[in-house]
Image: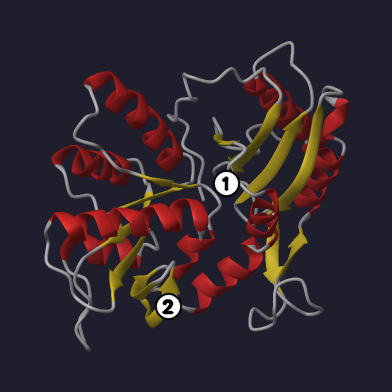
Amino acid sequence: MKANPQTKRANWHDYRSPGRYMITLSKGVGIPPFSQIDGDWRLPVGTRGSSYTRWSPTGRIIADKLYHLGELHPSLRAEQYIVMPDHMHVLIWVKSTLPEHLGFFIARFKNTINSAVGIDHIFEDGFNDQIVTNKRDLNTIFNYIRSNPYRLAIRRAYPDFFTRCNNMIIGDTPCQLYGNIHLLDNPFKDQVIVHRADNDQTFLANKDRWLHTAANGGVLVSPFISQREKSIRKESESSGGRLILITNRPFGEREKPSGKNFELCAQGRLLIIAPAIPMPLDRPSCLKMNSLAQTIAFGF
């Protein structure tokens, strides 16, 4: 995914503090690809001959500097990384409190690459970040980073992203899926739900978190029923966000999404999940859809 230079950092978080952060940097305009995808995507990820990245000279320098990230500051460690053709992901472990904002060290990392390659602006301005909280499973994040070449190979093989699955059990609910099924693999999913009892302060705090997730490569999961939930969907779409939409009605045999949903599916930014058995749009059904969204976001 592309980093968004306009993305704001999480204003509720101290980026000097210990913890783990998944950082994405995108290739600068006019810079040759960092790598190319080789291997056979039909083979299981990690097996001999499966999809992998073959680094360019610049990509090799980036990978080497990531491996030696601790040279920027002893508190920094790159636990997992991937150098893709047009971007890179790195899971950074900040082992102890930093003297400066993490963004200071990311800027130093960029400058180190520029100097080693001998070209300015190897990366776009800015970076995307996801703050890894205790509820995130590290193995899921490791697998997500490692499987980037596979997912890109799949996107190239099936560019329209109209994957359809008629029978998947999520929690205890038989479901239909339509769209980019790989959004389920994203380790940074968050449920969008606005409760009736939420005051403005609670809503605005949640809104900041949700929009930060969406703008930095995560996935928002919700039926997006209430007006406030719909407003979150609209804002996240405008920032290039990705969504998992829960609906109450299964698809017809030849049915495809229409309008905006069609466009988002074609861009790989939407997965629609529906129960195999239709439900009325009433309060019990809304509660069930929100429960399904919670399972997908935090337990799937």
Quarter of the view holding residue 90:
top right
Callout 1: helix, strand or loop?
loop
- Which residue lies under the disc numbered 1? 30
**Distance of label 2 from label 1 (alpha carbons):** 43 Å
Indicate the position of residue 69 as horizontal and vertical percent values.
82, 33
Callout 2: helix, strand or loop?
strand
Indicate the position of residue 83 as horizontal and vertical percent values.
70, 52
Say which of 161 and 121 sits in front.
161
* Disc 2 residue crowd, few under 14, some 14–19, many 20+, Cα 10 Å: some
Left or right: 20, with 232 as reference point: right
- The amino acid type of the residue labelled 1 equals Gly
- The amino acid type of the residue labelled 2 equals Met
Residue furthest top as drawn: 99
Q: Is residue 197 above or below residue 233?
A: above
Q: Is residue 247 above or below residue 40?
A: above
The label shown at residue 102 is none
* Disc 1 residue crowd, few under 14, some 14–19, many 20+, Cα 10 Å: few
Left or right: 113, with 253 as reference point: right
- Which residue lies under the disc numbered 2? 168
